[in-house]
Amino acid sequence: MELVESGEGILVLPVKREHSIEDEPEFAQFMAFIARDALSRPQTLGDMADLIEGNDELFGDVPAE
């Protein structure tokens, strides 16, 4: 909750939640599909270190949010 002082007193407001892709109904279905595929064909999985190699050089000046 968020407390906001107003001319009439203190208001108790719900925290504003930003929309996330995880809120989409299709997200859970997609993640289940990815998990099934990864478990059924583990030989197709790659090393994440190879995937993100060079990201620091590429995105080093981009501020994180």
Image: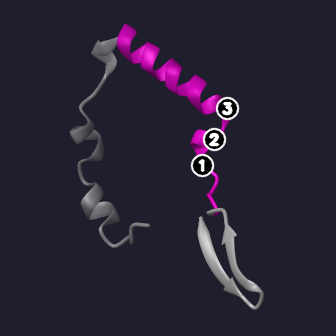
Q: Position of residue 41 (x, y in %)?
A: 36, 10
Quadrant holding the C terminus: bottom left
User: Where does label 1 land, which residue?
Assistant: 20
Residues packed near mark 1 inside 10 Å, few (<14), some (14 to 19) or many (20 plus)? few
- Where, by quadrant of the figure, is residue 40 drawn? top left
The numbered mark at residue 23 is: 2
- The Cα–Cα distance between marks 1 and 2, rounded to whole angstroms, is 5 Å
x, y percentage for residue 26?
A: 65, 30
- Amino acid marked by disc 2: Asp
Residue 37 or residue 17, whichever sits in front? 17
* Outermost residue, right side: 8
Residue under the image location 39 percent in, 72 percent down:
63
* Secondary element at tag 2: helix
Vertical order, 6 against 36 (above or below): below
Viewer-side residue, 58 vs 40 = 40
Q: Which residues are magenta?
A: 16-40
Q: Residue at x 36, y 12 (%)?
A: 39
Contact (CB < 8 A) between labels 1 and 2? Answer: yes
- Crowd rating for badge 2 (residues with CA inside 10 Å; few <14, some 14–19, many 20+): few
The residue drawn where x is 62% and y is 63% is: 15
Q: Main secondary structure of the magenta part?
A: helix
Which quadrant of the structure image shows residue 54?
Answer: bottom left
**C-alpha span from label 3 to label 1:** 11 Å
First in sequence, mark 3 or 1: give its number. 1
